[in-house]
Amino acid sequence: MLKDKVVLITGGSKGLGKAVALKLAEKGANLALLARGEEELKKTVAEIRQKFQTKVEGYICDVSRPEQVQDTIKNIIKDFTRIDILINNTGIWWEGNLEEHSDKKLRELFETNTLGYIYMVKYVTPIMKKQKGGQILNVASVVGADIEDEWSEFAPYTATKHAIRAFTESIRKEYAKDNIKVMAIYPSGMDTEIFESAGFHYGKNAEWMMKKEKVADIIVCMLSQPADVVLNHIEVRKLGYL
């Protein structure tokens, strides 16, 4: 079902994005991977080409910059001619009370975690409409599904993920008439680089962390449903936590 599909993955060079890319490549999907870091992106593209007989290309793109998003999508269409699936996965993390966040950090959080997703959908959906269908999967966070007391110390991050939930729910019916599935997954913390990149040194083996490969399996399952079936949203939590 996923063989020969063209899948665009933002944040596709490492973490969950890379885990999903590897599993989709194994299924025979063709991959357009977006990332800001050139070195990691080149490594991931090379690894997939070595392991699988599938087409994969990497594109340097900051999804918070709409002009870069537009140019990148144009290049993807030149290389692949179509986009069947969009996986919005890019994200950054900061924690701490609101007063501890600089205005610059707040702006970057929303530009990347929220506006980046919106820009991607805005410029990919016209292509999917012409193709008479497609799939959009937004990777949010369990903090976007509900609010718990222990999440009070990262309210700005939580706000970006609640915005994605509202956005996803708002466009689901709008695009259903165009045969475009719109879904979201809300996972809890995973063993990715997102915390380390923000300067929080939890390591990758904390007891509360899920394995990114397990979450990637769920994403592949969501994308593999029959044409007339859509898994609107799934919350994924590690047993015993959250």
Image (tube, rainbow, N blue to C red):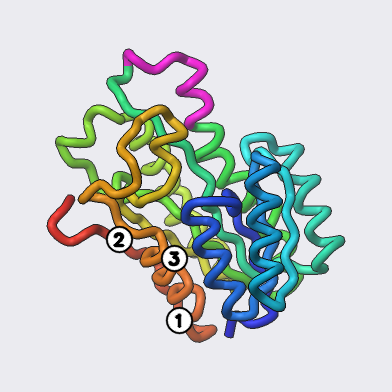
In the image, residue 142 sits, relative to residue 36, either above or below, namely below
The residue beneath circle 3 is 216
- Residue at image point 86% right, 61% down: 78
Instruction: Give 72 or 192, whichever is nearer the viewer.
Output: 192
Q: Is residue 191 left or right of residue 56?
A: left
Marks 2 and 1 in Cβ contact (< 8 Å): no
Q: Residues within 10 Å of mark 2 (few under 14, many from 20)?
A: some
Q: Earlier in the sequence, mark 2 or mark 1?
A: 1
Magenta stretch: helix, strand or loop mostly: helix
Name the secondary structure under disc 2.
Answer: strand
Q: Which amino acid does label 1 sit on?
A: Val
Given this view, does label 3 or label 1 mark the residue nearer the observer?
A: 3
Residue under circle 2?
235
Write down the region rendered in magenta: 99-109
Q: Which of 182 and 138 is in front in this view?
A: 138
Who's the residue at 64% across and 72% down the image?
Answer: 51
The residue identified by callout 1 is 229
Residue 241: x and y in percent read: 16, 52
Question: Can the viewer see residue 55?
Answer: yes
Quadrant the N terminus occupies:
bottom right
Bin the neighbour count of mark 3 within 10 Å (Cα to Cα): few under 14, some 14-19, many 20 and up.
Answer: many
Q: Report x, y in % for residue 168.
A: 46, 54
User: Residue at 45% across / 54% down in the picture?
Assistant: 139
Give the quarter of the image for residue 180. Answer: bottom right
Give the residue type that dot 2 points to. Answer: Glu
Q: Which amino acid, by three-letter code, is at mark 3?
A: Ala
